[in-house]
Image (tube, helix red, strand yellow):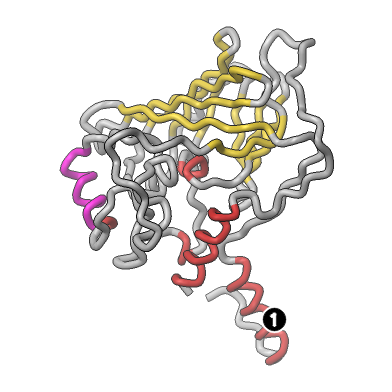
Amino acid sequence: MQVGILNRILKGATVLVFAVILRGQASQPPSASKSVPDLTGIWVRRPIPPPPGLPKPDPTAGRGVGNPDSYGFTPNLPEMTPWAEEKYKFVRAGTKDPYEMKPEAPDTELYPYCLPGGFPRLFAVPFPIRIVQTPDIIIMLSEYESAVRQIYMDGRNHANGAPPTYMGDSIGHWEGDTLVVETVNIDDVSWIDNLGHPHSDGLRVTERIQRPDANTLQIDFTFEDPKAYTKPWTGKKTFRLMPAGTAMGEFFVCDDYFKRTYTDDLKSGKMRGRP
């Protein structure tokens, strides 16, 4: 099951936007009638070339090798505390290249258990994201896992005592033409990226989201987690705007497995339900 799931993930990442259907060629221009930028649209990540000095990717060694943008946030790998280092080494055992997607064994991955990757990891997979913007809330819909992220813009504070979630508690405000988002209370079962960097329940992610031109979205990240990292560290992702009329598909990690189980049960007449 695990190999099939991971192969499906890698196949989807290679295609990049396998479920995107183009229905028009006109770009979606930013709204000129608002005092703040309009981020509305479907955005697909732009690949960032690997920085000088990194080895060239080896196609036989695994996807993403040699380019930290493939599955991580920065070429400067963050300094971890002993607590995080122990977790990271266990995940990375058997992997030679620090920028290669995690190995299949030993497997502490969420996918074989059909658990979502969550935030900020949703930005570490190359699938499109739709942004829906209103004055009070900004919603990010990811094709990957059909994940929904809500950024509250109505002036509220972070919720006290709420249980952690995969997407965390995101509060945003505008600083000129930059959307500043602070996210806390992120479930620590997840990783920060697809390279296996762990985090604690104290992770705080600050994003500065800008639209430098009509077809580009840039997100600058700051990660703060004193339990896991010796100091705050940063990362960046850029996206390009898809043409008007683009549609997003669905990609569920365990959809094929559970659909097959369900149809097999229907044929046998014995419905097992949940494990």
Q: Residue at x 56, y 38 (%)?
A: 45
In the image, residue 99 sits, relative to residue 272, either above or below, namely above
Residue 156, picture quadrant: top right
Residue 191 magenta-drawn?
no
At horizontal 63% and vertical 43% (from top left) the residue drawn is 128
Q: Is the magenta stretch mostly helix, strand or loop?
A: helix
| Residue 271 seen in this snapshot | yes
Residue 153 x, y percent position in the rendering: 62, 21
- Crowd tier of the residue under label 1, counting other residues whose Cα lies within 10 Å: few below 14, some 14–19, many 20 or above: few
Give residue 229's position: percent from left, percent from top: 25, 34
Instruction: Check disc 1 and give the amino acid type.
Output: Thr
In the displayed image of the protein, which residue is found farthest to the left? 82
Which is more toward the observer, 193 or 216?
216
Q: Quadrant of residue 206?
A: top left
Relative placement, left or right, of 15 versus 244 is: left
Q: Which is nearer the eye, 128 or 68?
A: 68
In the image, is residue 110 above or below residue 210?
A: below
Residue occupying image coordinates x 35% and y 34%: 51
Nearest the camera: 239 or 182?
239
Q: Where is residue 152 in the image (x, y as percent from the top left)?
A: 61, 26
* 68 vs 213: above or below: below
Tell me, yes or no, if residue 166 can be seen here: no
Residue assigned mark 1: 263
Residue 23 vertical placement versus 37 (above, below):
below
Q: What stretch is highlighted in magenta?
A: 80-90
Apparent side of residue 149 relative to residue 6 in the rendered image (left or right): right
Secondary structure beneath dot 1 equals helix
* Farthest-out residue, bottom: 268
Question: Residue 227 in the image: x percent, y percent?
Answer: 24, 36
Name the residue at 61% across, 26% down: 216
